[in-house]
Image: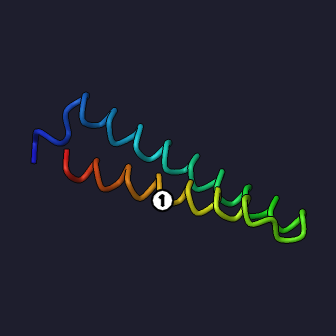
Amino acid sequence: MRRFLGPRWLATHLLLVVCCAVMIRLGIWQWHVGGIRNGDLRNYAYALQWWAFCGFAVFFWARL
């Protein structure tokens, strides 16, 4: 447990949280843009892609 509270690991945890927050926000923004453009499927796909990237980041963080 002590290993996960070292400065290097805390920086990694902080980086993950910041990256996930940015990716979730970008997904919300793309979803909103898709709604403005009368349901453009490309924007909805990009929104889902950003959320999938966030899921992959959490998955690889857990594997690390």
Horizontal relation, residue 42 to residue 60: left or right: right
**Residue at horizontal 66%, vertical 51%?**
26
Name which residue type carries label 1: Ala
Quadrant the C terminus occupies = top left
- Give left or right: position of 12 versus 33: left
Q: Position of residue 47 (x, y in %)?
A: 64, 60
Query: Mark 1 = which residue?
Result: 52
Tell me if 48 is positioned left or right of 62 in this view.
right
Residue 62, compared with residue 19, is above or below; it is below
| Residue 21 drawn above or below residue 42 | above
Left or right: residue 48 compared with residue 2: right
Counting from the top left corner in percent of width and height, residue 25 is at 64, 53
The residue located at (19%, 33%) in the rendering is 6
Q: Position of residue 23 (x, y in %)?
A: 56, 49
Residue name at image x 84 percent, y 68 percent: 35
Rendering colour mode: rainbow
Q: Tell how many labels.
A: 1
Q: Secondary structure at mark 1?
A: helix
Q: Residues within 10 Å of mark 1 (few under 14, many from 20)?
A: some
Residue 29 in which image quadrant: bottom right
Residue 62, position in %: x, y? Answer: 24, 53
Q: Residue at x 73, y 59 (%)?
A: 43
